[in-house]
Amino acid sequence: MEIVTVRNLSFTYPLRGEKALTDISFSVESGDYLAVCGGTGSGKSTLLYMLKKELTPRGDLAGEILFEGKRLAEIGDKDSACKIGYVMQRPEQQLVTDKVWHELSFGLENINVPSNVIHRKVAEMASYFGIEGWFEMPVDSLSGGQKQLLNLAAVMVMNPKVLILDEPTAQLDPVAAVDFLETVARLNRDMGITVILVEHRLEHVLPQCNKLLVLEDGRAVAFGKTRSVISSLEKNEQVLAGMPAAVRLYNSFHFTDECPISTGEGSLWIRKHFSNRDPRPKEKVKRSFAGPALELKDLWFKYGRKEHDVLRGTALTVYEGEIFCILGGNGSGKSTALSCAAGLLKPYHGEVRIFGKNISEYKNMLWGRELSMLPQDVQTVFLKNTVKEELEDSGACESLSVYDLKPLLDSHPYDLSGGQQQLLALTKAIASRPRLLLLDEPTKGVDTYTKERLIGLLKQYRDEGMTLVIVTHDAEFAAQIADRCALFFRGAVTSVDAPEAFFSENNFYTTAVNRMTRDYFDGCVTLDDVKEVCEKNHD
Amino acid sequence: MSEILTLPLRSLKSLKRFEDYNPIAVFVFFAGAILPAMFCLDIILLLISFAGGMSLLFSLKGKAAAKSLFLYLIVPIAGFILNPLFYHNGKTVLFLINDTPITFESAFYGMSAGLMITAVLVWFRAFSLIMTSDRLLYIFGAASPKLALILSMTLRYIPLYTRQIKKIRMASKAMGLYREDTLIDRLRGSVRVFSAMVTWGLENGVITADSMSARGYGIGRRSRYAIFGWLAFDGLLIAASAILCAGVLVGAGFYAFGFEYYPEISAVPISAASCLCYAAYGILVFIPVFINIKEGLTWRSLQSET
């Protein structure tokens, strides 16, 4: 049974000439899992707004949207609120009330369900999602992943038929993101809930969804069964960039067999088509480093007198002119170490040296002339009303990355996509021409296409002599950019190595490419590596 | 009250602590315990009230309450010393300072007033320990579900905004773009943070509003989900509090007990009625401790049975 049908949908925002969506048609059967993908500005979010009556923006709408055979606009308020669930990108901002139990009951209270019925439904959902333990906690004490799970649960108590998710994992770390997507897949599988999901990163979504819709400039360029759509992506660079490594590898060769989707399938696919006579990519040029730029010596830190130590003897040296990536799990102390290095937090023991000079010897925050740090939440960096003012305010008009921001000069910083926001914040951060740049999770909320651009820019800064220290969860990113990587565990560095050696020796903290080629090729960590080796071994 | 779960009165072997009673019942109890102390400046009644309040604090906080005991006693002592310096009514002159008489009555009145303040403070302290935001919201929500939602959203926004302000401040510090050398620099910084906060708040509000309307806010009458159940015990607590408090107040109204301070200290003579009033108030203020001790004993006997 078709549950959502869209026919010849076009939409124009008021006061704008061009259409945001043009002539889109697709349909979703009950129990389907549809993933919608496309680059920044392709109209993904606008399309989702069209499917939820309460959120549809004003504008010129043509075409037809049917829900369970009825026109969407004619569905009653209560039915619309209950049957179509909607989860947005930012976990924090979607929460309405102060307690977990109140958030869960909020939707049911709105449609005037009696207390004892709410009690039953809330109890059921809380135990399904495993959130009984936080039931009476304030929402403020939850982690980002927990908040997003709560948002999902708060929608699920209303018993929706269709679940619409707009980049729900963009703000989450990889572990929480996988967890969240697993839950969504389980809802789809166990309860038969129809899912419509927009994502940039499709590594984990592809094996779960059964239909795929590809948008480009507001048009639907492909729609159909997942496998048939992805084998035809060759030319669409923006969309391809967000695909799993296996799909990207498949699309850079011209085989006619079925496209591998998961890491496991990719691994078999490589073994089928390529030999391993020459399993190594060519040795990377080792860069030579000058003196130390940042030294952390035996740092100990805790947030409160009675709390646990977050840093336990952190010691590391970053040399001038290198890109140094710090990886590690949540709460391992990576971000805290970075804040200590920037002089924002003061360790109770140990020493921070910047270009050989102890940080306390710089008077009046003068180390700020040498280093700059970009926080995780880049929205905290924006202080003005337009991109132009923002650039003028920080005196960053001549920077490299300004090129990418040219078409956006008159927009409000908050209206940019996650990737564009990151670029703008980065431009501000390097405006003071620091010699040392510290970045905290620069790829969070950034689409894969912009990520490539970010990598290019950061490498260029390095080649101009800047030293970069990057804290990240993103192994693929670190593999592409780092000169050296470090693994953080319980407040200390456990291993430091060049990325090839670092990722080849890790089992969990490694890239999909490395997992795919493990025990067959040697030392492949990035897509370029594996492409190179595959070409060498192609018969 | 149809929306509240009603459970039958079970055997008296209850394992409910006073804090876990329905917030409305607890609220009525506190009103009943505090009102007489506020209106009767009777030293015996105030002593009972203070002892009752302290016993509840002990049962809530354990030994930590002992520390505050001395702090609370400062107020009546201060009243005892300071009041006669400013008010010179009363017949019994103790001594003269610069030709102004220091009277025993005035000192005694100061102590009583101090004791009243202390007793009320102790009760409010216990009240604030027990009445967490959830419980207060439950009480307000009974009056108006809308008000309860507004309060709940406010409680959510306070920590959210405080954290964001701190983050924005840290961010501009870490970027090394803005000087912070002089007072004017710092003032400018604050204005910057404030305006960024306003923008962020508006943006934030839009998303929250979307999230609310997506879940059907504003389409009609709201109901209210109460996480606190209603047991017959709660009714008992309300009835006991109301009856005992009314008894004491009526007694005070008919001068069954009470104190005259000026010109000379004179108490209403002890009678059956006054004893009854003191006893009623004594029972009232020790109800929480009685409930908690009984809970402890029941728990222990249940443990030893197994």
Image (spheres, coloured by chain):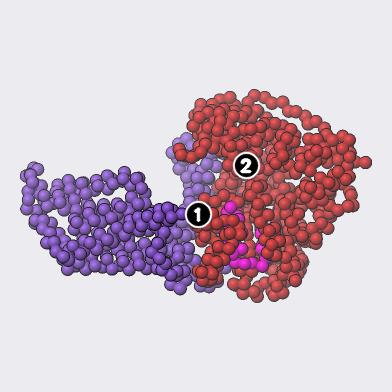
Which hue belongs to chain B? purple
Q: Quadrant of the C terminus of chain A?
A: top right
Q: Secondary structure at mark 2?
A: loop
Where residue B283 sits: x, y (%)? 27, 61
Q: Nearer the viewer, residue B22 or A383?
A: B22
Q: Using the image, determine if residue B287 lies above or below residue A478.
A: below
Give residue B235's quadrant in the image.
Answer: bottom left
Q: For residue A162: magenta?
A: yes
Where residue A404 sits: x, y (%)? 70, 46
Q: Which residue is mark 1?
A: A137
Residue A398 visible? The answer is no
Pointer 1 chain: A
Q: For residue B135: magenta?
A: no
Q: Give the distance between the C-alpha atoms of the residues marked 1 and 2, in whole angstroms.
A: 24 Å
Name which residue type carries label 1: Met
Pointer 2 chain: A
Name which residue type carries label 2: Gly
- The dot on residue B100 is none
Mark 1 and mark 2 lie on one chain; the one further toward the N terminus is 1
Q: Nearer the viewer, residue A489 or A371?
A: A489
Q: Quadrant of the N terminus of chain A?
A: bottom right
Q: Using the image, determine if residue A539 lies above or below residue B281.
A: above
Residue drawn where x is 51% and y is 71% of the image: A114
Determine whether, in the image, residue A154 is placed left or right of residue A225.
Answer: left
Report the magenta residues as a range.
Answer: A146-165
Where residue A278 sits: x, y (%)? 87, 34
Which hue belongs to chain A? red
Determine whether, in the image, residue B237 is placed left or right of residue A393.
Answer: left
Tag 2: Cα neighbours inside 10 Å, few (<14), some, or many (≥20)?
A: some
Q: Nearer the viewer, residue A386 or A22?
A: A22
Q: Which residue is mark 2?
A: A329
Residue drawn where x is 65% and y is 28% of the image: A320
